[in-house]
Image: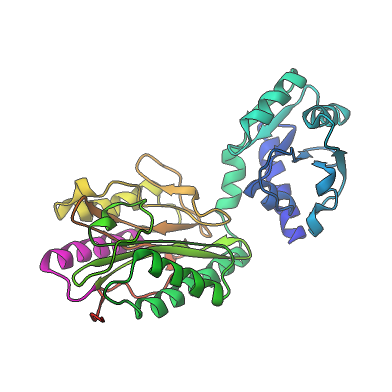
């Protein structure tokens, strides 16, 4: 991917140059991977990539990372510090050596405050600028290759969900179902995975985790899950029913499904993020459940499971072809039930495509002892 990373970095530099920024400084996390090709997570050891608008880019890394963990970023110049040395001082000196001691240097929202604070003291004439929106916009608009990786991750999640829902049985725990789903996605080729499973009244906890709650007839089964392919995530939620759903469960489910479809139909280039949220919210409010839809409609999906763009009221960002995000309306009535129908979708030139394909119609599974 090194050519891809270089192309994206070039786009980022063009964007920040327009605003008088002289360099970008990236710390471990998704941005350093996306714009350099070096995949490294945040730790107590400083690592950074300094990419000037003019001049050669350079990594500042510990000697443990001198070989980039066997990876092939698009540039390889590095300043190496050893365990007994002051890594922040080396970074400040590297900035000064490249004529950036009084420059405007762009940081993103994931920059670790501790290192930035130390660097500010060592390089007092540097002006740090937030370039999160500029770099974030480039990541929002996926290439066809990125969309294809997400589509493959969605296919794995779809298949794992269908294979596992057929195994529902009375007395199984949320944890057991979560473990089965995790193993199934791994077997099908998923990289990193996440799974949340909630039965019955616990499905009203949108961020609840799997517990030892046992499945019983009449329960709703809410599963929120996804996996990665080449580092790119899928995200899907389905709510099924164990045994025949009640009239109330059916009404609430169909309301959420209608909201999911309304949001899908609202997606097109030029539409605002908030308009997609409003389309779904209107359906739920008109059905009398507005106070139970307690979160934004969706979030971007890519190298992070939650990233820009966010489908939320007051976000007037306009959609563009290639933006990938979740469409996930929900109704959560504490102590009773929760229903969510979530798809990973992509804005296309003509509208919207769902990358998750598992059936959305109300589905119940037979009771099995």
Q: How many marks?
A: 0
Q: Find residue 350 and report its image quarter.
A: bottom left
* Residue 331 visible in the current orientation: yes
User: In the image, 33: left or right of 254?
Assistant: right
Does 137 sit left or right of 368 as displayed?
right
Q: Position of residue 126 (x, y in %)?
A: 74, 22
Q: Is residue 262 within the magenta segment?
A: yes
Q: Quadrant of the C terminus?
A: bottom left
Residue 206 is inside the magenta segment: no
Where residue 67 appears, as percent x and y from the top left, is 85, 53
- Tell whether 157 sits left or right of 103: left
Q: Which residues are magenta?
A: 242-264
Question: Which of the two residues, 309 or 331, is positioned nearer the viewer here?
Answer: 331
349 vs 317: above or below: below
Tell me what residue is drawn at x 85 percent, y 48 percent: 66
- Main SS of the magenta segment? helix
- Could you tell me which residue is drawn at 62 percent across and 67 percent down? 145
């Amino acid at each position: 991917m090194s050519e891809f990373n270089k192309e994206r970095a070039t786009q980022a530099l063009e964007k920040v140059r327009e605003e008088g920024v002289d360099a970008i400084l990236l710390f471990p996390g998704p941005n350093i991977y996306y714009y350099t090709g070096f995949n490294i997570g945040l730790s107590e050891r400083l690592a950074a990539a300094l990419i000037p608008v003019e001049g050669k880019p350079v990594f500042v890394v510990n000697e443990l990372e001198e070989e980039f963990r066997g990876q092939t970023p698009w540039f390889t110049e590095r300043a190496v510090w050893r365990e007994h040395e002051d890594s922040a001082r080396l970074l400040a000196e590297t900035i000064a050596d490249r004529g950036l001691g009084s420059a405007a240097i762009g940081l993103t929202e994931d920059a670790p405050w501790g290192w930035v604070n130390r660097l500010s003291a060592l390089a007092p004439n540097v002006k740090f600028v937030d370039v999160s929106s500029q770099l974030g916009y480039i990541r929002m608009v996926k290439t066809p290759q990125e969309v294809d990786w997400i589509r493959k991750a969605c296919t794995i999640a779809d298949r794992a969900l269908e294979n596992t829902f057929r195994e529902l049985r009375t007395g199984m725990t949320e944890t057991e179902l979560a473990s089965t789903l995790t193993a199934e996605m791994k077997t099908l080729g998923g990289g990193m995975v996440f799974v949340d499973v909630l039965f019955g009244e616990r499905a009203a906890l949108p961020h609840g985790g799997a517990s030892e709650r046992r499945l019983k007839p009449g329960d709703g089964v809410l599963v929120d899950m996804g996996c990665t392919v080449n580092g790119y995530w899928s995200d899907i939620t389905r709510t099924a029913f164990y045994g025949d759903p009640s009239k109330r469960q059916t009404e609430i489910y169909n309301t959420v499904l209608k909201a999911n479809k309304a949001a899908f139909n609202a997606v097109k280039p030029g539409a605002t993020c908030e308009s997609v949220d409003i389309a779904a919210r209107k359906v739920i409010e008109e059905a009398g459940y507005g106070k139970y839809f307690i979160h934004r409609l969706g979030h971007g999906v890519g190298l992070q499971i939650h990233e820009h763009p966010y489908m939320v009221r007051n976000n007037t960002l306009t959609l563009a072809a290639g933006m990938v995000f979740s469409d996930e309306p929900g109704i959560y009535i504490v102590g009773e039930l929760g229903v969510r129908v979530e798809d990973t979708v992509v804005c296309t030139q003509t509208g919207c495509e769902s990358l998750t394909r598992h059936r959305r119609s109300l589905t119940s599974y037979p009771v099995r002892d």
